[in-house]
């Protein structure tokens, strides 16, 4: 079994590393250089036709991509501790919050990164006005999340879950590209402190 990924600040490979750390699963990551465009090489596209990381290749040659799919595989093979919920309601709530983390939080962060950040200017045609507009969109998303976290410690409820992993990697990447959590969002700050204090956050 081989896990192909990339080091920080890449948020998606970090999701899987955090998940594995929470599970106590030791699987070294085989690095793919994003700076050298190795993820777009024919060799890697044979594993993942979209040319992305992370990608997990099983012993039988099956290749699994997309972070949540990879983490679901490991959750099935090692159920404890559960990170996708245990009851039907918990599982539904975790799924709901994973999607919200990806669509409400990550989309504007990705839009800003692709179209407003100088590091990506040489990689694609940027639409700067659109890119900058995502700063406000992300701020509004954090404002909404701040309200949601007023009465519970984690995104999907009382237990830490895959949803928190998705959100943590997003807000940390956002901070790295110049979109920090505003000080007035005390609930988001407190949540971030809780999830960052977990040893897995260092993955």
Image (tube, rainbow, N blue to C red):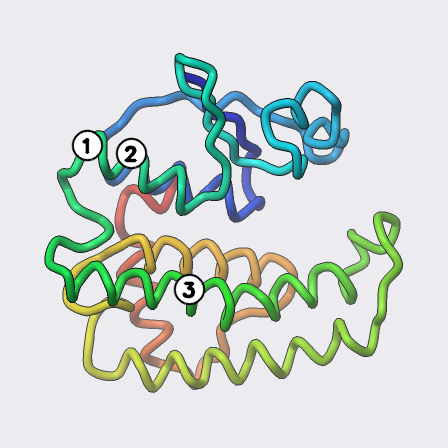
Q: Are marks 2 and 1 in contact (CB under 8 Å)?
A: yes
Quadrant position of residue 91? bottom left
Reading the image, the residue beneath label 3 is: 99
Q: Residue at x 68, y 31 (%)?
A: 39
* Secondary element at image label 2: helix
- Compared to residue 49, the image places residue 87 above or below, namely below
Q: Closer to the N terminus: mark 1 or mark 3?
A: 1
Closer to us: 149 or 100: 100
- Compared to residue 97, the image places residue 119 above or below, namely above
- Compared to residue 169, the image places residue 141 above or below, namely below
Reading the image, the residue beneath label 2 is: 74
Q: Closer to the N terminus: mark 3 or mark 2?
A: 2
Reading the image, the residue beneath label 1 is: 78
- Compared to residue 195, the image places residue 82 above or below, namely above
Q: Percent x, y for residue 60?
A: 41, 13
Image quarter (top left, top right, bottom left or bottom right) of the N terminus? top left
């Amino acid at each position: 079994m081989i896990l192909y990924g990339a080091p920080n600040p890449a948020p998606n490979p970090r999701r899987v590393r955090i998940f594995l750390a929470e599970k106590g699963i030791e699987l070294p990551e085989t690095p793919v250089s994003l700076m050298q465009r190795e993820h777009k090489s024919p060799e890697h596209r044979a594993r993942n036709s979209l040319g992305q990381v992370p990608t997990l290749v099983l012993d039988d040659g099956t290749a699994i991509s997309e972070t949540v799919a990879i983490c679901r595989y490991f959750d099935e093979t090692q159920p404890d501790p559960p990170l996708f919920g245990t009851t039907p309601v918990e599982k539904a709530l975790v799924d709901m919050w994973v999607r919200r983390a990806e669509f409400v939080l990550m989309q504007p962060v990705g839009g800003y990164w692709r179209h407003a950040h100088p590091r990506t200017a040489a990689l694609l045609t940027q639409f700067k006005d659109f890119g900058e507009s995502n700063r406000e969109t992300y701020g509004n998303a954090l404002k909404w999340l701040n309200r949601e976290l007023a009465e519970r410690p984690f995104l999907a409820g009382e237990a830490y879950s895959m949803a928190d992993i998705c959100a943590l990697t997003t807000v940390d990447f956002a901070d790295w590209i110049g979109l920090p959590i505003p000080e007035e969002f005390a609930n988001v700050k407190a949540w971030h402190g809780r999830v960052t204090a977990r040893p897995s956050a260092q993955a």
